[in-house]
């Protein structure tokens, strides 16, 4: 027997076995695997939702080395291709991973893949380290709604568009805070200022909004000027930890994910000293149904110090200050739909993004948005809106009727 | 100088000082103190909300020894009398205690007074140990609503009566569970069966309701028979831990307080194995805004193994099972009003209760109901309704609109 022939026959068998082994550890998703030589095989007997093509053999070794980084980077670099619907693929893999018992040696490692998909795998390779929020307004303008709201929307009707659902979210938050004209509101982490402006314009409140990003603050000020809201809204280019005033309402949407568990107690103390005794507050954040660490690489390169907390972990903000929880709402399905809408918008401008950055960047973002949607769809990720008040505040609403009263949310 | 005269002058001065010292440690409530000799003095410069009469000197020493037991027992035995509105007195003392920083040596001890007032002071003395739930249906029929609902009501309108608010609560719970005809519901701790019957009658579900109390179960079965609900509702006279079936909805109203922290994890495991993957559950419980131990005497004599948990503590039920929290609502102000309504009803039948038990029993219950109301009013106690589902359940409602839809809650 010719040695050359033996090798070329044996190798695909070996690669198949390794891929099957990896897929088994993930929980046997209903996908098919196609190798670089065209060899294709399904993982289960069921109809595959998508095909994962391994274009170069080294992608297998990358995944063996680290499922999280290996898959994310290989996909971004085009060593792996997903044929079919990327979102369907992400949903399938995330679902089987979520249901798999994380036992034994491989459990913790496998969790990393989840993270890579959920909170992205913006490649480790140095040429691709664009910091998430430093990508610039122009990038986000391409695929967010026109108000540039980069947090979970609220689809209060089944037919709502992304833009409508974002306004509905802004209004849902305002209603939960029971804003009254003349009140003073502090916003910690205001993004491009959509909520601050909505509160001022539709509820007549004074807003002091904090954000560290120079470019976002510049954009927000310009928009506020164009809408004649400068008198009511002040954008402060500073860290939320410098907040040093009293308010009737404290609100933070999509910032807690970046605060980090170690700073929760400090945030609670800040809220306690900022909020008047009859004040009310709201934190809107990505969370989890149980405590779980984020992928170390994600924490290091994408969300420094970041953490998606469980509710018990979130309570370390409130309980040491004896702050009372009034209302918790979980909007995870809304975030799955939001990410899906973002992905659709993103795909429509992919060529433009590739010209601005690179093809690899486009692939990373696709995976990040699809993986995030899948995380919320599967329940690996949650979205909590938590309403709270100083313990003795008896001006809190008796019921939640006011959240569901008639009248358009979009004013 | 006559020694006799010196003593009779000096003693009241000493007692005044001791009482002022005790009141200072409590946080200086706006009350006045009247001693057995008629000597009366206010604690603050503000108008007293009530007068606390110390009828016998030993009550002071009882309070010095243990604020919790000393006050509760002395009041019950008539050594202390409150002139004016007992509820106003309880609210004032609870409020100043809640706001007082629990620092230094006396802090932990003072907390006990709070407990004695909030979750009652059914006197330690042996002749008065009537176990809370063993008092018999006839006792509770005297002052609860006609459905015998012994948990927080839901005052969905400002003018609702206690009976209306109890029905509104039953319906609020049903709506949160999104009950559909033909579903199977497990209820852990069903009291006199009001919720089980409401679910079956108005939502067409099959209910299996657990309760350890023979007398309550007998009552519930009789009522269910009278309403032709035997086919749909099964009352099981057993501990909730024996639950051993699958259900579409799991509900427990007012039982968790008695479960004890040590059993939370077991309860979570029970819920996990009982609830179908697309099921939904609700726990309604007294809680706290921060973890705090119950008074050891209360735990020993009134609520063995009992604990009013903080939300973080409650999460130890859900997070180890990766159960997802969908909704938390805090109804503490509703419970303050409920206890107030109970107190009003109780006062109207006080003579009858005194004949059935004793004057001391009446005084204990008055203090218990007034103190509980004050606990909820001050925010020392909270009332949480927590809705949850297995993590991957995507049939959960998108919004909470259905809770606030038109139509009478009372059917």
Image (cartoon, coloured by chain):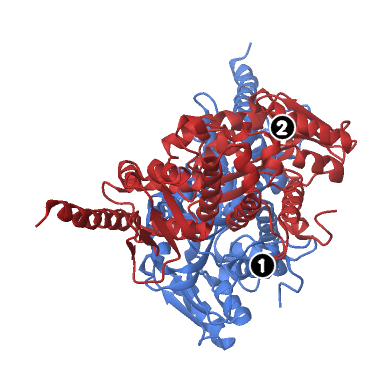
Chain colours: A red, B blue
Q: Which residue is mark 2?
A: A216
Instruction: Say if B138 sits above or below A249 in the image.
Output: below
In the rendered image, the quadrant that contains the N terminus of chain A is: bottom left
Towards the viewer: B391 or B313: B391
Residue tagged 1: B166
Q: Nearer the viewer, residue A359 or B348?
A: A359
> Could you tell me which secondary element the residue under label 2 belongs to?
helix
Quadrant of res A140: top right
Q: Nearer the viewer, residue A339 or B237?
A: A339
What is the number of the mark on residue B190? none
User: Label 1, label 2: how many angstroms apart (C-alpha)?
Assistant: 50 Å
Tell me the quarter of the picture where residue B378 sits: top right
The spot of residue A281 in percent (x, y) is 69, 40
**Residue in the picture at 48% in, 66% down:** B189
| Closer to the eye: label 1 or 2 | 2
Q: Farthest residue in the right direction?
A: A228
Q: Nearer the viewer, residue A235 or B343?
A: A235
Question: Image point 71% across, 60% down: which residue?
Answer: A156
Residue A211: x, y in percent? 69, 30
Spot occupied by residue B100 in the image (x, y as percentages of width and height): 62, 30
Q: Dot 2, how many residues are within 10 Å of its Cα: few (below 14), some (14-19), or many (20+)? A: many
- Name the residue furthest left: A1
Q: Secondary structure at mark 1?
A: helix
Asked where in the image residue B63 lies, by quadrant, the reply is top right
């Amino acid at each position: 027997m010719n040695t050359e022939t033996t090798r070329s026959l044996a190798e695909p068998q070996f690669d198949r076995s390794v891929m099957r082994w990896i897929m088994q550890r993930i929980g046997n998703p209903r996908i098919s695997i196609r190798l670089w030589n065209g060899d294709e095989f399904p993982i289960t007997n069921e109809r595959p939702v998508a095909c994962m093509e391994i274009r170069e053999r080294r992608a297998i070794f990358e995944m063996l080395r680290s499922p999280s980084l290996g898959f994310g980077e290989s996909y971004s670099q085009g060593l792996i291709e997903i044929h079919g619907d990327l979102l369907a693929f992400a949903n399938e893999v995330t679902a089987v991973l979520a249901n798999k018992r994380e036992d034994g040696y491989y459990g913790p490692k496998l969790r990393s893949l989840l993270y890579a998909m959920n909170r992205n795998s913006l490649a480790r390779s140095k040429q691709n380290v664009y910091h998430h929020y430093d990508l610039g307004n122009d990038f986000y303008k391409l695929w967010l709604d026109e108000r540039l709201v980069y947090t979970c929307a609220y689809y209060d009707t089944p037919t709502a568009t992304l833009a409508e659902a974002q306004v509905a979210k802004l209004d849902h938050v305002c209603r939960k805070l029971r804003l009254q004209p003349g009140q003073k509101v502090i916003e910690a982490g205001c993004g491009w200022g959509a909520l601050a402006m909505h509160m001022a314009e539709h509820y007549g409140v004074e807003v002091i909004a904090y954000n560290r990003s120079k470019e976002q603050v510049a954009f927000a000020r310009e928009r506020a000027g164009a809408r004649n809201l400068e008198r009511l809204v002040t954008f402060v280019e500073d860290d939320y930890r410098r907040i040093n005033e009293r308010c009737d309402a404290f609100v933070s949407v999509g910032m807690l994910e970046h605060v980090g568990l170690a700073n929760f107690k400090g945030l609670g103390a800040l809220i306690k000293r900022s909020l008047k005794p009859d004040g009310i507050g709201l934190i809107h954040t990505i969370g989890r149904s149980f405590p779980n660490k984020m992928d170390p690489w994600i924490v290091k390169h994408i969300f420094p110090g970041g953490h998606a907390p469980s509710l018990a972990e979130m309570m370390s903000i409130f309980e040491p200050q004896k702050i009372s929880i009034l209302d918790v709402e979980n909007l995870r399905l809304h975030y799955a739909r939001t990410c899906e809408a973002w992905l659709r918008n993103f795909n429509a401008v992919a060529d433009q993004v590739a010209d601005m950055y690179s093809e690899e960047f486009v692939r990373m973002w696709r995976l990040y948005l699809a993986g995030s949607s899948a995380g919320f769809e599967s329940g690996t990720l949650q979205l909590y809106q938590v309403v709270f008040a100083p313990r003795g505040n008896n001006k809190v609403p008796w019921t939640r009727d006011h959240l569901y009263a008639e009248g358009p949310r979009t004013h």
